[in-house]
Image: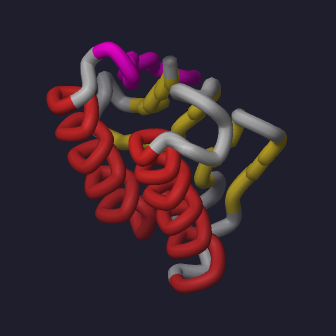
Amino acid sequence: MIAVRFESADGGAVLTGFRVSGHTGVRGQSVVCAAVSSACYMAANTITEVLGVDAQITVNDGYMYVAAVGDDLPKAQVVLRGLRLHLEQLEQQYPDKIKITYTEVQ
């Protein structure tokens, strides 16, 4: 199971980042896991390298944490919302493989 947690501020109006953990199926052989990983890496790279937003990033085997910080947080909104939409649609297609939750951070 892949667990995705989107973090937000201002009552959920502003996405600040996401955490993804877990695997599905046999490592290296799951299309769902590859789709989630690819989308998350694209989001992280777009936020930091294309938009130049300062972010806290942690990546380990089966885990990724990305949190946009500072005054450039509004720039990351389109990317984070796009990722959320993409992963929500995957969750609808594969509810036994992906679980998305939401939390507000201070």
Which sits in the foreground, 68 or 85? 85
Question: In this rendering, would 12 be left or right of 38?
Answer: left
- Closer to us: 67 or 90: 90
Q: Write the residue at 50% across / 51% down.
A: 34
Q: Position of residue 46 (x, y in %)?
A: 52, 74
* Quadrant occupied by the C terminus: top right
Residue at position x 71%, y 35% in the image: 63
- Give residue 96's position: percent from left, percent from top: 32, 14
Where 90 sits versus 38, above or below?
Answer: above
Inspect the magenta stretch and tell me whether residue 33 lies in it: no
x and y, in percent, of residue 69 in the image? 64, 53
Q: Main secondary structure of the magenta part?
A: strand
Residue range in magenta is: 96-106
Tell me the residue at 38%/53% (across/down).
Answer: 80
Specify whether 19 is left or right of 42: right
Above or below residue 62? Residue 36 is: below
Task: Judge by depth and name the residue closer to the eye, 74 or 56.
Answer: 56
**Percent from the top left, x then y, of residue 27?**
67, 37
Please report the residue visible at 69 percent of the width from the left and 58 percent of the height from the top: 55
Magenta segment: does it hold 99? yes
Q: Residue 11 lies in what quarter of the image? A: top left
Direction bottom: furthest residue: 50
Colouring of the image: secondary structure
